[in-house]
Image (cartoon, rainbow, N blue to C red):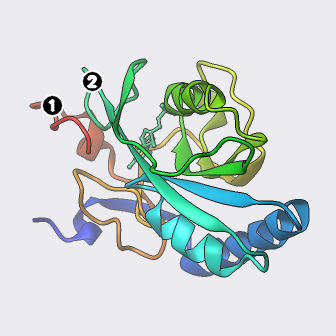
């Protein structure tokens, strides 16, 4: 297993900046959802670090739950138009205020599919909180209500985001060296 330093081109968002922004988002969400039945819905696995830090910055009561998705056909390093739920949440969301917590929105296909599915379950409200937004790559229009950082079109890892399932533990967001993600090779297995 390579050390993360071998694949790191640059640090894009250092740990201290991440923590400041997460606490700002926590304050904003606490204000916006005061007095409401809030459910944070984390998309596994990339959203876990963000969720864990974000919930510690919320001053209002809230529940949490998890969903996991698999994408077909093109592997984990590119986005796919087709996503499948491999782990569904186990709470009823009807009439509740659901805030989806996602690591990164890239083309938007994943979050669009999640929104479409959850809407059928009739939540009182349904919003998105994404730590990272690669807005220039968007292929479908999706409303993102809370954004941590708008980032350029580069493959990033750390703070929940992986390179072939590794390095999610890093406390910063790093950019991977180009050869990490442009080298042709066998497709990584479908996630998760
Ligand atoms: P979308 O469907 O918006 O194109 O893709 C969203 C998913 O693609 C994210 O949840 C994440 O799993 C993956 N993804 C997109 N860009 C990156 C990236 O730069 N780094 C990593 N590690 N995953 C990414």
Is the CB of mark 2 within 8 Å of ligand 1? Answer: no
Q: Is residue 45 left or right of residue 123?
A: left
Q: Quadrant of the N terminus?
A: bottom left
Who is closer to the viewer here, 21 or 59? 59
Q: Secondary structure at mark 2?
A: loop
Crowding near the residue tagged with mark 2, few <14, some 14–19, many ≥20 C-alpha atoms within 10 Å: some
- Asked if residue 86 is positioned above or below residue 17 in the image, the reply reads above
N-terminal label among 2 and 1 = 2
Who is closer to the viewer here, 19 or 99? 99
Q: Is residue 84 left or right of residue 48?
A: left
Q: CA distance from mark 2 to mark 1?
A: 7 Å
Could you say which disc has been placed on residue 187 in the image?
Answer: 1
Could you say which disc has been placed on residue 74 in the image?
Answer: 2
CB atoms at circles 2 and 1 under 8 Å apart? yes
Q: Residue at 27%, 24% (x, y): give it.
A: 74
Q: Secondary structure at mark 1?
A: loop
- Asked if residue 75 is positioned above or below residue 59 in the image, the reply reads above
Task: From the top left corner, tell me how far across and down residue 44 is, in percent.
Answer: 40, 52
Task: From the top left corner, tell me how far across and down residue 117 is, in percent.
Answer: 55, 27
Q: Is residue 157 left or right of residue 4?
A: right
Task: From the top left corner, tell me how far across and down residue 2 is, in percent.
Answer: 14, 65
Crowding near the residue tagged with mark 1, few <14, some 14–19, many ≥20 C-alpha atoms within 10 Å: few
- Asked if residue 34 is positioned above or below residue 89 in the image, the reply reads below
Task: From the top left corner, tell me how far across and down residue 93 is, in percent.
Answer: 63, 45
Q: Quadrant of the C terminus?
A: top left
Which quadrant of the structure image shows residue 56?
bottom right
Which quadrant of the structure image shows residue 141?
top right
Q: Ligand 1 is located in which of the four quadrants? A: top left
Who is closer to the viewer here, 95 or 108? 95
- Asked if residue 40 is positioned above or below residue 4 in the image, the reply reads above
Q: Is residue 40 left or right of residue 83?
A: right
Which quadrant of the structure image shows residue 48?
bottom left
């Amino acid at each position: 297993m390579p050390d993360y330093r071998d694949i790191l081109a640059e640090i894009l968002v250092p740990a201290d900046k991440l923590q400041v922004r997460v606490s700002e988002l926590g304050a904003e969400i606490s204000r916006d959802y005061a007095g409401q039945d809030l459910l944070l819905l984390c998309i596994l696995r990339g959203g876990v670090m963000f969720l864990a830090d974000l919930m510690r910055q919320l001053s209002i009561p809230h529940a949490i739950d998890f969903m996991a998705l698999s994408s077909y056909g093109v592997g984990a390093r590119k986005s796919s138009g087709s996503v499948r739920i491999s782990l569904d949440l186990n709470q009823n969301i009807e009439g509740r205020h659901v805030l989806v917590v996602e690591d990164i929105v890239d083309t938007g296909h994943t979050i669009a599919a999640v929104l479409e599915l959850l809407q059928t379950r009739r939540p009182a409200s349904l919003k998105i909180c994404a730590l990272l937004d690669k807005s220039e790559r968007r292929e479908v229009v999706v409303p993102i209500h809370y954004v941590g950082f708008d980032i350029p079109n580069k493959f990033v890892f750390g703070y929940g985001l992986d390179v072939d399932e590794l390095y999610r533990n890093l406390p910063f967001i790093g950019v991977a060296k180009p050869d990490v993600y442009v080298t042709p090779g066998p497709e990584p297995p479908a996630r998760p």
